[in-house]
Amino acid sequence: MKRRFNPIKDKSSEIINYLMASPDMPDDEALRFKIQLSIEEVVDNVVHYAYEGGIGWLEVSTHLDSNSLILTVELRDAGVPFNPLEQSEPDITLSAENREVGGLGIFLCKKLMDSISYRYENGNNVLTMTKLIWK
């Protein structure tokens, strides 16, 4: 399942809903919750930070491998090159007041998903997340 949204300004909810409606998504509510939180974080980051004023495109896709074991969610945009995986991990031992702003969302994605990778390819940011969905 693949779709390009253009422009993406004010379309976070529409993009998230599209991905979560994919027939590739698992039925298990606990898995869906983890996947949705991760999707919300990365989609919101692209919509708010990839393009000046949110004027740009975002292509999203889901894929379930042939054994129906691994769900892959991919986001591709032509915004400002940015690898969220290079950001330092937040110090979660500190109180919210003493912690630096940012980084908590991608930290959460790393904990909820089985793998996250980033590449810059042909002028595009490509973020790929996978989740093992078999029981």
Image: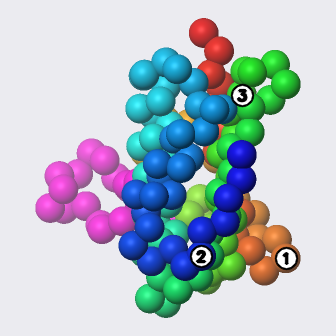
* Of the pair 107 and 14, the residue shown nearer to us: 14
First in residue order: circle 1 vs circle 2: 2
Do we see residue 109 in this rendering? no
Q: Secondary structure at mark 2?
A: loop
In the rendered image, which residue does mark 2 sit on?
6
* Kind of residue at badge 1: Asn
First in residue order: circle 3 vs circle 1: 3
Residue 104 falls within the magenta-colored stretch: yes
In the rendered image, which residue does mark 1 sit on?
122
* In the rendered image, the vertical position of residue 30 relative to residue 73, given as above or below: above
Task: Name the image quarter holding the C terminus.
Answer: top right
Q: Is residue 10 left or right of residue 123?
A: left
Magenta segment, prevailing SS (helix, strand or loop): loop
**In whole angstroms, how far apart are the C-alphas of marks 3 and 1?**
26 Å
Task: Please give the range of residues in magenta.
Answer: 87-107
Q: Is residue 42 left or right of residue 83?
A: left
Residue 10 locus on image (x, y percent): 39, 73
Q: Secondary structure at mark 3?
A: strand
* Kind of residue at badge 3: Ile
* In the rendered image, the vertical position of residue 37 relative to residue 119, given as above or below: above
